[in-house]
Amino acid sequence: VAKDVETLKGVPEGLKYALRWDTPRPTGTAAEATRGSLYVELDRRPVWGDRIRGRPVGIPWTWIDLLEHLTKSWPKFMWEELEPLNLRVPVFRLRAEAQRRWHRRPQENAESEQRALLRFQTAHDLATALGGTDTPSLWVVREGERVILSAAGITRYRPFVEVRATLEALGSEIANRLDAVSDGRGIDARTGWQSRDAVPAETIVALATGLPREQLLLLSGNEQFGEFWGVEGIDPQPTPVLAAARMLGPDAPIAVLRHCLNWIRSVPRRVTVDLDGLATEAVRRVGIVKAKRPFVQGYALAEWFRAIPGIVTDEGRVDPERILKSLSVDVSVDDLGWTDIDAVACWSPDHGPAVRVNSGGRHAQGEAGRRTTIAHELCHLLSDRAASLPLAEVLGGRTPVVPEQRANAFAAELLLPRSIAGAAFPNGSAVEKQTESLKDRYGVSAEVVAWQALRSGLPLRKHVLASLRNYVTDKDAWDVAVKRS
Ligand SMILES: [Zn+2]
């Protein structure tokens, strides 16, 4: 048993696999030479195959199919971070959520969405390599410096470099098996695998942004394409321009895209030693919050941050813009010409950290919304630069769900702690007056007051809840939260 365990390759907390060939030496065609069984586990639990009396037993197949799949999908593993419908659900729920949506939508649109989602799943679900079998889905989707792995009801975030190395080892093990095979399929599969990283700049940018090619060409204009997008040369890496374009999305007017991307390209690099030190501690703290729900992490982070002397003024107020500036972050305000987004921010080895608040943004156009927006970006700067959002963020755009929920909770708690909001409505009279006074004193919107009061967990009377509900935009979410409280 111990010997079998040692034959597994990979990382215990992430992907591990064991490939066992049917014959000691490869013979016959490429398909025959790669016949064997593959066992895969995710965080120590079998997802392909099973353990029988402790022994890993894999799925029998001709594994050149998987090698061809890995080669074809490689650019997507490297560059495609966002599923095409932006459904904002975990990958394993994509199909179910999409079905629900198509149920409500005109058929024409649903069909094009179906094709887009199928293309995405075909690339990112390794089980599609074994077409037509009932092999469980094994999802691989990049998110910044991490990869979401999801299979058999288990979802794990693992470092991008680790997952890439594991998939490379697996692919190379199959490719090596083809060294002595001289049929056309075997040669194609081997050479294809060797050149998996040779991807044209146009393909990289299309995958990394999810924007249509015509739009991409419009944006680069007279400039050399690869240079505009920062992907020229060998071994190109993700850039803040690519990340921001993806988050702005295909619905953003071209002028807005151009404005935001050119702003990022113009932002110089800044040294932020103090911020980086706080970020190290913030990441450590997010890691030790036992409850995994992102809003719980956001609250915990805000509580820690508020306790740092100087963050909360003597009047009990927090000024996020002053804090960011004191941490050497470039904060500016500009009308970006589109109400849907409230801010764009970038941080990379070459640009920023810098935050540009949209004075025309739906929330950021008022003072309270602007403060919340900057507090939200502060959370990303503290907790997400190392993993989820290594390059940029667009508030209101197509951003990953977990860091977004965490940053929203952090922003609310930093400006108006739940304990203060909840305690402000003790006997339930004068809800409006109390709300106004909290708004003024803490510089937040009435909506933030309402949610923070509800989430305080303190008992609130029925008519207080009914009055606070008037301030809330998403009344369904409010009703659900009230029921649970
Ligand atoms: Zn955000």
Image (spheres, rainbow, N blue to C red):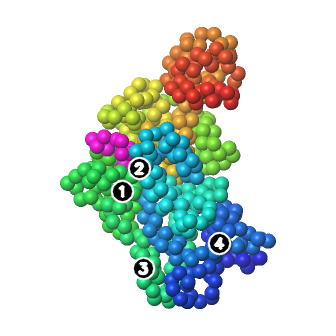
Q: Position of residue 89 (x, y in %)?
A: 55, 46
Magenta stretch?
Answer: 245-257
Residue tagged 2: 112
The amino acid pointed to by label 2 is: Ser
Where residue 26 sits, quadrant-wise, is bottom right
Residue tagged 4: 59
SS class of the residue under badge 3?
Answer: helix
Residue depicted at x 51% and y 86%: 29
Q: Are marks 4 and 2 in contact (CB under 8 Å)?
A: no
Q: Is residue 250 magenta?
A: yes
Residue tagged 1: 206
The amino acid pointed to by label 1 is: Ala
SS class of the residue under badge 1?
Answer: helix
Q: Position of residue 254 (x, y in %)?
A: 28, 43
Q: Is residue 285 magenta?
A: no
Q: Is residue 219 left or right of residue 67?
A: left
- Residue lying furthest right: 53
Mark 1 to mark 2 CA distance (whole Å): 18 Å
In the rendered image, the quadrant that contains the N terminus is bottom right
